[in-house]
Amino acid sequence: MQVTETLNEGLKHEFKISVPASDLDAKADAKLVDLKDKVRLNGFRPGKVPVAHLKKIYGRSVMAETIDQTISDTNRQIFEDRGFRLAGEPKITMPTEKDQVEELLSGKTDLTYTVAIEVVPPIQLADFKSFSVEKPVVEVSDADVDDAIKRIAEGSRPYNAKTEGAAEKGDRVTISFKGTINGEAFEGGTGEGIQVVIGAGQFIPGFEEQLIGIGTNETRTLKVSFPKNYLNEKLAGQPAEFETTATLIEAPGETTIDDEFAKTLGLESLDKLKEAARERLTAEFAGATRQKVKRALLDRLDESHKFEAPPSLVAEEFNLMWNSIKAEMDSSGKTFADENTTEEAAKEEYHKIADRRVRLGLVLSEIGEKNKITVTDDEVSRAVIERARQMPGREKEVWDYYRSNAQALAQLRAPIYEDKVVDFVLELANVTEKKVTKEELFKDEDAEKTAA
């Protein structure tokens, strides 16, 4: 066998391989000998079929199998000998001319092919004990708990029918309506007994505001336009009129925050409600803290590991991101000018983000491999159970989906693995706590999710 490297440019390599026909023939004959004891042919006793006869019957298929196995074994040996970690599947090029293929399958010519690959560069991991990471900490105050309970109370407040006066902002109006576009009724454009809290922003822009001043049993024609990003594409951006009648107007009442209110929420007392609110806020703040610390650590890992990311992986990540961005913009009707940028500038920015994500993914993978960090089946099962809990009534459907979908399971496993690697590095790093305000903790949260 002869192996010649024909390309060595950065992370790209290409090899030309030639395997003598005699080697292929010997391997194929060995397979035929093994086959002799397994096949049953009329006129021959078991195990007594001559290899030459088997070759006439199965020669081409056995040779094809031999060629595939030889290519696989040869490539693996080439990559292992050079210590290559592949960034993607090898690209194999073989003769395609009918005569060449025929001669190859007949064992009359050498196997000659090329294999092109892109590799992951060697990654020299940093000394994680030298890392310093700041951990923002927010204590849940009594005022935070009181505010949380007030929000719950506002969402549970009673409404009382107004005996006189017109609808005001904050009132709940029960309406019936018939919508038209250019005088024609449209699907989903009618409603009976629909409750609308004026100012809650539940309906399309402009609808609720035009209910201010309406009286009981009064009918108005409300003129609005559906948003450009409306889910129903047939209605998106369309001007519409709704003939609307108010059948009931209710003013918001006050909710007394006491033990009785807590009992309406299924809790024993106000103190228990406060405990539950504090626990929920503590978990919420802890989650935000975790995201801040993780982002800081990923930034540190990014700064400490500069290497060329495999272009194919960066391109794949960029395409996923860019297709999502374009679909979102098309749906909302926005342009790059609306975002104070250009398509070229946006592409450049997202390409940088894609490059960062790929490099961080490779670094985290390297840390995990070198430190034997794994995700157990139990951890994945717990993640599936948690997903199922989020969809009451469809638990079995969720469970069956993940059980029969390896790719979906891999998508669940990936963030678990990433978090375990992050925790491993944090154990080695110097983590210091810093008390911050609630506003500081949640500042720029969306931007961090995008860049991470």
Image: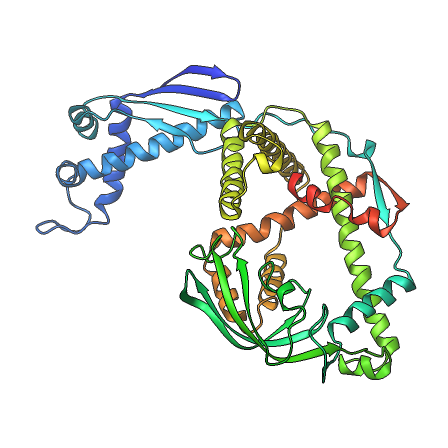
Q: How was the colour assigned to the protein in this rendering?
A: rainbow
Q: Is residue 196 above or below residue 33?
A: below
Q: Can see residue 1?
A: no
In this orientation, which residue lies closer to the viewer: 212 or 443? 212
In this orientation, which residue lies closer to the viewer: 201 or 238? 238
Is 97 left, or right, of 406 in this rendering?
left
Location of the N terminus by quadrant is top left
Image coordinates for residue 201, horizontal then vertical, percent: 65, 62
In this orientation, which residue lies closer to the viewer: 278 or 361? 278
| Residue positioned 38% across, 29% down in the render | 91
Q: Is residue 299 above or below residue 81?
A: below
How many labels were placed on the picture? 0
Is 125 left, or right, of 328 in this rendering?
right
| Residue positioned 86% across, 82% down in the render | 259
Location of the C terminus by quadrant is top right
Q: Is residue 209 above or below residue 353?
A: below
Q: Can see residue 273?
A: yes
In this orientation, which residue lies closer to the viewer: 428 or 384? 384
Is 317 left, or right, of 50 in this rendering?
right
Residue 249 image-quadrant placement: bottom right
Image coordinates for residue 174, horizontal then vertical, percent: 61, 77
| Residue positioned 39% across, 32% down in the render | 73
Residue 132 image-quadrant placement: top right
Is 15 left, or right, of 21 in this rendering?
right
Image coordinates for residue 154, horizontal then vertical, percent: 77, 71
| Residue positioned 16% across, 45% down in the render | 48
Image coordinates for residue 234, horizontal then vertical, percent: 42, 56
| Farthest left residue in view | 43
